[in-house]
Image (cartoon, rainbow, N blue to C red):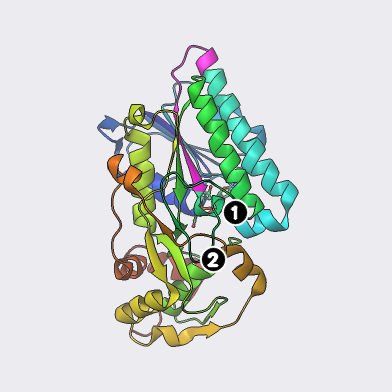
């Protein structure tokens, strides 16, 4: 099985690549080749099959990024929320034209006699609005309140239509905010959700721009990777024309998240400083905090673990690597 990861140097791209390298298979099929593509060449994971890394721009993607015979494309490359809001041209270019480029690359494979590759696309909770009181069901309309969300919703439609036309076989997963993100803060408006857990677990302070009662729809990196791999291997015939799914994330308040932090490291939440930020609050305040995800369960997407396990998973999976990456000493236990 030949697999490409676009955005292979990013947070989720690296995790998916590491998982594939470790397992050597996707579903019940062995992996024969993995291609990792990003703006700078991704690091190669240790794998029992050939891994090719390529640097380039998604919009002018070289043909080798999705080579002939590709079975699965993970389309994760994107300009994330706050950055896409701050730089309209860049967000539109990468998130919209980049997705067009993925469609064209798949079309070329099919035109040359190949099979339509499965394309697993990461859409976002940010493609919805409604605010703190919203509870959205599977049929909820996407009414984005920021450019990033609009670009993700548009990309979902383009991919669903390309599926109908037989150019590819898309599954778009509208990911919740993924916490705890390792490494450094990024340009996502939701970056603070990870920071208020990660930084105290590294012994550092973090700013909280919203009230403690603020609720959010989140998921762990472990669950996000599981869902992406399930989307890559599942039978898509059950999806019909609707190629998008709201996966079973978990709704949590900041207060609950900080309790979970203290359960894992007593007193750690004292490092969280309340510093209101109107711009960030304006973006994340419009994202809905609860979804009914019956369709995802029916399609076999795994249910979510409790919030305290999300905090523990950062300690188990990513804290040490983050300390090393940032040149930080281990905090006292
Ligand atoms: N992490 C989250 O909380 C979250 C939530 C919802 C959706 N998503 C979506 O999931 C995907 C992965 O998210 P992530 O957190 O790993 O993001 P990330 O920023 O860590 O990774 C995205 C990668 O895309 C690459 N990229 C950007 N522009 C590019 C271009 N022109 N050409 C090639 N590569 C380019 C970046 O270099 C980066 O490595 C994204 O599509 C994101 O929008 C993430």
**Residue at image coords 42%, 72%:** 253
Q: Is mark 1 within 8 Å of ligand 1?
A: yes
Task: Please indicate whether residue 2 sits to the left or right of residue 302 in the image.
Answer: right
Q: Is residue 247 above or below residue 96?
A: below
**Residue at image coords 62%, 55%:** 145
Is residue 279 at least partly visible in the picture?
A: yes
Q: Is residue 35 above or below residue 22?
A: above
Task: Please indicate whether residue 132 sits to the left or right of residue 311 in the image.
Answer: right
- Quarter the N terminus occupies: top left
Is residue 79 at least partly visible in the picture?
A: no
Q: Quick one: which residue is furthest to the top in this view?
A: 113
Q: Residue 176 at x, y = what percent?
A: 45, 56
Q: Secondary structure beneath disc 1?
A: loop
Where does label 2 land, which residue?
A: 191
Crowding at label 1, few (<14), some or many (≥20) Cα neighbours within 10 Å? Answer: some
- Quarter the C terminus occupies: bottom left
Q: Which residues are magenta?
A: 110-123
Task: Please indicate whether residue 19 sits to the left or right of residue 275 in the image.
Answer: left
**Residue at image coords 68%, 56%:** 85
Where does label 1 land, which residue?
A: 80
Q: CA distance from mark 2 to mark 1?
A: 10 Å
Looking at this view, is 142 or 301 the one in front? 142
């Amino acid at each position: 099985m030949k697999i490409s990861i676009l955005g292979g140097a990013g947070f989720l791209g690296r995790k998916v690549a590491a998982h594939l390298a470790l397992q050597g298979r996707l579903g019940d099929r062995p992996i024969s080749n993995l291609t990792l593509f990003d703006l700078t060449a991704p690091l190669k994971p240790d794998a029992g099959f050939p891994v090719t890394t390529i640097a380039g721009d998604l919009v002018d993607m070289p043909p080798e990024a999705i080579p002939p015979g590709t079975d699965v494309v993970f389309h994760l490359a994107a300009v994330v929320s706050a950055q896409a809001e701050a730089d309209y041209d860049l967000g539109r270019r990468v998130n919209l034209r980049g997705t067009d480029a993925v469609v064209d690359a798949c079309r070329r494979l099919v035109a040359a006699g190949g099979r339509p590759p499965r394309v697993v696309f990461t859409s976002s909770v940010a493609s919805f609005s409604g605010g703190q009181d919203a509870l959205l069901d599977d049929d909820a309309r996407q009414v984005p309140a920021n450019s990033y969300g609009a670009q993700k919703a548009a990309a979902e439609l383009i991919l669903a239509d390309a599926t109908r036309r037989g150019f590819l076989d898309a599954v778009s997963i509208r990911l919740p905010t993924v916490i705890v993100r390792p490494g450094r803060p990024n340009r996502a408006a939701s970056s603070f959700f990870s920071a208020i857990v990660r930084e105290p677990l590294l012994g550092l302070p973090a700013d909280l721009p919203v009230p403690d009662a603020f609720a959010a729809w989140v998921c762990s990196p472990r669950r996000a990777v599981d869902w992406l791999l399930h989307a890559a291997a599942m039978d898509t015939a059950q999806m019909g024309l609707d190629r998008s799914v709201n996966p079973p994330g978990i709704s949590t308040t900041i207060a609950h998240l900080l309790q979970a932090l203290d359960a894992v490291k007593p007193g750690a939440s004292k490092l969280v400083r309340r510093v209101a930020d109107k711009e960030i609050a304006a973006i994340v305040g419009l994202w809905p905090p609860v979804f009914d995800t019956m369709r995802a369960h029916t399609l076999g997407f795994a249910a979510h673990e409790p919030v305290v396990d999300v905090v523990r998973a950062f300690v188990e999976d990513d804290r040490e690597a983050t300390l090393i990456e940032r040149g930080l000493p281990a905090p006292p236990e």
